[in-house]
Image (cartoon, grey):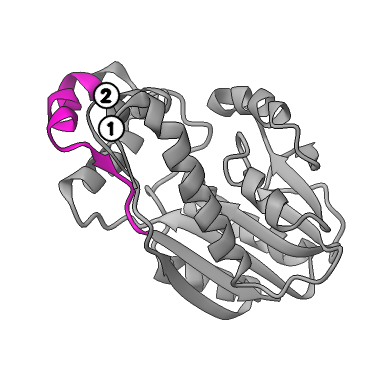
Amino acid sequence: MIARTREEIEPVLAKYYDALAQFMVGLAEIPEHAVILEAGCGDGALTTHLSHLLQESRILCYDLYRGVYERDLNTLKERALNISIIKGDVRDMCIHTGSVDFIVSNELLCDLSRNDTQKTINEFHRILREGGTFVHGCLSPYPETRAQELVIIADAYSADPLFDHDWFSPPADELAGVLHSAGFSGITVEYFLTPVKLSGDAALCHLKEWVLKPEFFEDYSAEINCCGVEYPVEQVVSCQK
């Protein structure tokens, strides 16, 4: 999927997240009238499509909504979805033990350090019911093209990171180890192979929404205009309690 102008960005990303939501839900056996937690839901880009797929379930949207992510709360509310919003820290969650049937998150752990990732995964294991499933998606930290590498470079220029983090995304094998140490089993890694590429005005417009340091655009605008940016392959890890 390719966006060449700023007007094409939103429909292209909507198709991407719709396909990703279907992919993630397809990895779990979700009971009727399930309690579902989306952790780090942000502005609801994925939430919108999860809510359409899981209309009979109760969806809890959990996010801290501080710093650069504070503005996302209003965007999520404007989507007028049938969800419950909880403001809180995923490292210490105000949710009862064993009360959630399915946990899904996307591009959450990339914002956390390795130590905080372990704390968060431990919390997910605690609140998930026996037999429940956790599915997490993150962009691969191993770029296959220069356009993908520019996305990874851009992330390092974040102007206001909310947490200290030491990776662009957790490598799938390292994340599998963290999940295992928390007590999860049946750990599998799938790859979501629906690419998003943005070129020209679309690429620069999209990156400016990321709140990056001015130096990034000074150093890389010419190259972005030349080759655009492309999301790396999505690593989707699933496991059971």
Q: Is residue 46 magenta?
A: no
The label number, if any, that marks residue 4 in the structure image: 1
Cβ–Cβ below 8 Å for labels 1 and 2? yes
Q: Amino acid at mark 2?
A: Asp
The x, y position of residue 98, in whole percent, is 84, 66
Q: Residue at x 31, y 27 (%)?
A: 5
**Quadrant of the image for the C terminus?**
bottom right
Q: Is residue 226 magenta?
A: yes
Q: Specify the segment rendered in magenta.
A: 216-233
Mainly helix, strand or loop, the magenta region? helix
User: In this picture, is 225 found above or below 230?
Assistant: above
The x, y position of residue 86, in whole percent, is 78, 39
* Viewer-closest of 175 and 142: 142
Q: Label 2 crowding class (10 Å Cα cut-off): few <14, some 14-19, many 20+? A: some
Q: Residue at x 67, y 35 (%)?
A: 64
Residue 136 in sight in this render = yes
Q: Which residue is mark 2?
A: 201
